[in-house]
Image (cartoon, rainbow, N blue to C red):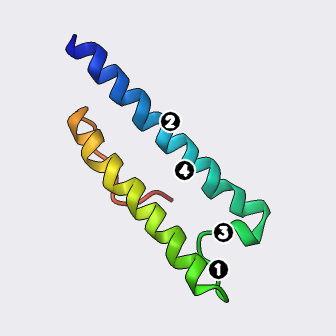
Amino acid sequence: MIDVVVADHAGYFYDLESEFHALWTLGHAAPHLRFIIQDDRQMTAARLVLAKGVVTVLAPGLALLGVQAPDEMR
């Protein structure tokens, strides 16, 4: 039973990361979809809160799965 729960959580974390990555990648082709927009502080702040929320969920989730997350990705 525990393997099923771990698999469910792993799937959730994978889906969350995939959706976030897709959203992040949209900014490469469409500048108005970037997370940091020089002349729109409110949108930038909102998108950074979203990014922080993803980190808040993924970091402990990966730790529960025994995976060490990097401090940053380049």
Q: Amino acid at mark 4?
A: Phe
Q: Are marks 4 and 2 in contact (CB under 8 Å)?
A: no
The tag earlier along the polypeptide, 3 or 4, is 4
Q: Which residue is mark 1?
A: 37
The tag earlier along the polypeptide, 2 or 1, is 2
Separation of marks 1 and 3 at Cα, in angstroms:
6 Å
Q: Is residue 6 above or below residue 72?
A: above
Residue at position x 66%, y 55% in the image = 25
In this view, the residue in front, 65 or 54, is: 54
Whole-percent x and y of residue 69?
32, 48
The picture quadrant where one finds residue 8 is: top left
Q: Amino acid at mark 1?
A: Ile
The tag earlier along the polypeptide, 4 or 2, is 2
Whole-percent x and y of residue 73?
46, 57
Q: Residues within 10 Å of mark 1 (few under 14, many from 20)?
A: some
Separation of marks 2 and 3 at Cα, in angstroms:
21 Å
